[in-house]
Each structure stands twice: as C-alpha cells, then as structure tokens.
Image: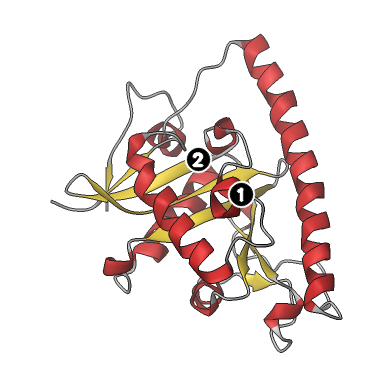
Amino acid sequence: MPDVIIHSTLLHPSTQPLIEGLISEYDGRYGTRDRPGGARGEIFRYPEGLYSPPLGDLLLVQRDGRTIAGGAFMSHDDETAEIKRIWTDPSLRRQGLARTIMSALEQSAAALGYTRTYLSTGFRQPEAVALYLSLGYRPLFDTAADPQLYRSLPFEKHIGARAGQKGSTPVYPPAASFEEATLRVKALKEGQEAKILARFAGHGAARVEAGIDGLSYQDVLSGHKAQTSVGTAI
C-alpha cells in the first residue's frame, strides 16, 4: 500500500508515536535541566485546537496503518503559520518523509489562506537546518555565527499567493553569550505565546457565535466539507 497522509489531533492515539519520538529526541539532545517539563511540557504548551483547521493543522504520514512521520502548524496572524513538531521515524530517515510532510503542511497552510510560514529549530539539529535551507527557507539568523549564540534558529518562507517571493524580515544578530541567547529566546517565546493564545481565544469565541464545525485535511485542500476524515495517498 502507498503511504497516506491523514489529519489528526494532538491527543489522538495515531499521534502518539510522533509525540513520544519528539520527546525522546529533544530531551536526548538538549536535556531537561533548564527546560521545565522538558520536551513534553513544550509540546503541550498550546491548546490542542490550535493545530486544527481553520487556524492550524496536524498531519501524519502512515504506512500500513503505522505513523512514520508527521508535523503541524498553528497561526501567528492572518498571514503567518508556524510549522512545528516535524518528526520522522529514526529507522526510516533519508527516504524523503520530512520533505513529504513539509510539502503537505505548506499546501494545507496555503489552502487556509496563509502566505508565509515561520519555523525554528534548535542549535543542535544541523540536519534540520540543512533540510529547511534545501526547501527554500530563508534563515533569519547569521549562518556564519555560532548557532549556540542563537539557541533557536528561525526561518521564513512565502507560500500560497506569495510563493516564490523573497522574505523581508530582518536577520537577527547573534547574542553575546549562550546565557543571553537563552534569555532572548525565552522572552521571544513568551511574547509569541501571548499573541497566539489571544488570537486563539478570539477566534474560538467567533467560531462559537457562528456555529462553525471543524474541517479535515481533505476539506481544507478541496475547499469544501467532506463527510469524514481522511486519507490522501502519496
């Protein structure tokens, strides 16, 4: 059977391989000493609904009913979606699965009207940096500087109606030390979190008032309501 992409949610059993895989990988690379709750706390930092249409999405690649890769995105504003939680099964890497899920997420985000994607990766993940650069993402950091002086490495890319256009967000200078970089990332995340949660709360209230139901991945790509969830062969 061909691999299929399905829409899922953060708490659905089909998503658990992604969650546990990310926790193992992140905690193994970065530890938990200066990260309260470790990777699990970060993964569940935001409400599950942020990763569902029309604000976001969570997609999984399945092979013979088993989750082997996945990722998600959530809304920053009307233009920008932040891609998060990119994961592939360690035993199946170098098969193009990360590229597959990235392409699917970009398509889904564009179908929801987003024209820009933003993402960040850690300073101990050079393979992720190489992937995003190869996919046309523009680094918002000095690639010649020590990545530890950023701690979190941000990227952007235009999609949808603005696909192919060059980004204009200023490149961030490196911090003077790892400690300063840590404080800067903490402040950035707190600011982003406040903005994202406020948007989610406002959008949730509007949806309740309008009586709008959720959409599936297939609904998003087709532009109309489908009957149930799910599979798109790849």
Residue type, mark 1 in image? Gly
**Residue that label 1 marks:** 37
- Residue at the extreme left: 1
Q: Is residue 90 left or right of residue 193?
A: left
Q: CA distance from mark 1 to mark 2?
A: 24 Å
Q: Residues within 10 Å of mark 2 (few under 14, many from 20)?
A: many
In the image, which is nearer the foreground, mark 1 or mark 2? 1
* Residue 14 locus on image (x, y percent): 33, 40
- Is residue 20 placed above or below 53 in the rendered structure? below
**Residue that label 2 marks:** 57
Residue type, mark 2 in image? Asp
Q: Which mark is residue 207?
A: none
Please name the residue shown 77% across and 67% down the image: 182
Q: Residues within 10 Å of mark 1 (few under 14, many from 20)?
A: few
* Residue 71 locus on image (x, y percent): 46, 52
Q: Is residue 134 left or right of residue 142?
A: left
Quarter residue 140 falls in: bottom right
Please name the residue shown 44% across and 34% down the image: 11
Residue 102 seen in the current view:
no
- State the SS at label 1: loop
* Residue 134 locus on image (x, y percent): 50, 76
Please name the residue shown 70% across and 79% down the image: 148
- Residue at the extreme front: 33
